[in-house]
Amino acid sequence: MLFIHLQVVRETPDRYHNGRVPIKSRQKRFHVFSSGFINSLTNNLITLIYKIMNLPYAEPFKTKMVENIYRSTKDQREKWIADASFNLFNLRSEQVYIDLLTDSGTGAMSDKQWASIMVGDESYAGSSSYYHLKEAIKELTGFDYFLPTHQGRAAENVLFSVLVKAGDIVPGNSHFDTTKGHIEFRKATAVDCTVDTASDTTSPNPFKGNVDTGKLENVLKATAADKISCVILTITNNTVGGQPVSMANIREVHKLSKKYGIRLIIDSARFAENAYFIKTREEGYADKDIRDIAREMFSYADGMTMSSKKDAIVNIGGFVGFRDEELFRQASTYNIIFEGFITYGGMSGRDMNALAQGLYEGTEFPYLESRIKQVAYLGQKMKEYGIPVLEPFGGHAIFIDAKRFIPDFPKEEFPAQTLALEFYIEGGIRGAEIGALMADRDPVTRANRYPALEMVRLALPRRVYSNNHMDYVAAVVRNVFEKRNDIRKGFKIIWEAPIMRHFTVKLDRV
Ligand code: F0G
């Protein structure tokens, strides 16, 4: 038996002291201590002191509760995966030893988040929890209006119900699959304008998530403005490997959108990780606080969708943020139909409290540093074993390049899915295919789409696994890599859903 650890986080100023809802004066004091200036000063000072003392970084939290996990045998796993029709989504979680399927909703909440759950206000309308969340969103994004939703795709559903019509074009940088799903479901078209280097897993470009502004301008020029729903900028860019978008690029995309009179919406699931990369990679941002960087990123947008299950470190939740009151009003109707009243959306009061607290914790530099360095630790280990991984390493996951891992493998037999299944059978690790299976069929021709990138994503839940777990994961992938010449046959589809097939697909060995 090994364990996953939950943590105590002691980095954010007390918001729920002794479980009491903060009174006004406490809130004021909180604002003073969480202001960009003090934060930036403290973080920079701590980083400097550790540098001078020649000490490495370490997690800014400790373990308070553990969850046991079961290490199964290879025979068990071979049976379980066949019973699951070779679809990793069909496994029971007990059948997985280290679960890297997603970093979404799988993070460990802090003691302060759990404490905030106890003081959630479950009033149907106008709860204090709603106002805590509103305050946190305003402070971190600058948006005056927001609608709570039960998760990110619900935020997309609410916003796109207003913005996206049949026949529309929605340009962006590698729309996430649910985003694309919502666009295509409305008979509109998502146009990918990501930079070309994004499909080269060896290119060292530090901002491979960027939009190619030339491609974007061509789309904006060629299409009537009333046929473009909005431009969607996904930060970080999950689909091409958790790669960041630079501030310079966000600014450029903003300028182009303004020039053509189109709204810019930020898909913000991993906005804090994006801010970390801007701080550590982009000139002029090294001394800026993460929250100031976040506010600047959002200052270029007209709205945002958020899956809070990622950078806000909660198990469920999301929201839509708006600058414009009129758009907020229009979207409110859809929120009420699909999600719930506008002051709770799809969330309970306690969930909104935990989310407000999580937004603050997720934008602390020491936390982000430990998170992103753990991802890099796993990537570096794999690199040392010669495993072809996407570089630079992403913010939330390590992506294994299936085309380089098994180069002659037929694309029709789903190479990345085949590898993901091998990793599970070898060591009980569950990753996710980001390749042809997920790319689905063309909605018009129904032909299979074969994307440039064919990868297995190993996404790290936040504040959950230790670096010993990372060593184990790297060793499992190494074992499969050493046997790669024996991997000759892949999988065929025996049943698939008409849209977003990868979640429920049934496969069999070729
Ligand atoms: N946008 C991005 C960039 C995402 O990565 C996700 C979810 C969503 C939107 C949708 O949010 O799941 O809360 O409805 N990504 C998860 C993942 C599922 O595993 O990458 P959701």
Image (cartoon, helix red, strand yellow):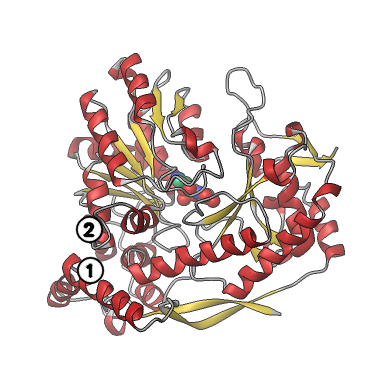
Image location of residue 106, percent across then percent down: 53, 63
Where is residue 2? Give x, y as percent. Answer: 67, 79
Amino acid under disc 1: Ser
Residue 121, x across and y down, in percent: 31, 67
226 above or below 465? above
Between residue 207 and residue 255, name the one nearer to us.
207
Please name whichever residue, 379 or 265, is drawn nearer the observer in this view of the structure.
379
Amino acid, disc 2: Asp
Dot 2 falls on a residue whose secondary structure is helix
Q: Vertically, is 12 above or below 496?
A: below
Residue ID at (24%, 65%): 128
The N terminus, quarter of image: bottom right
For mark 1, give the secondary structure. Answer: helix
Residue 161 located left or right of residue 315? left
Residue beneath the point at 28% across and 42% down = 248
- Could you tell me which residue is drawn at 80 percent across and 50 percent down? 484
Gap in angstroms between the C-alphas marked 2 and 1: 9 Å
**Front one among 416 and 392:** 392
Labels 2 & 1 near each other (Cβ < 8 A): yes
Q: Is residue 362 visible?
A: yes
Q: Which mark is residue 40?
A: 1
Which dot marks residue 292? Answer: 2
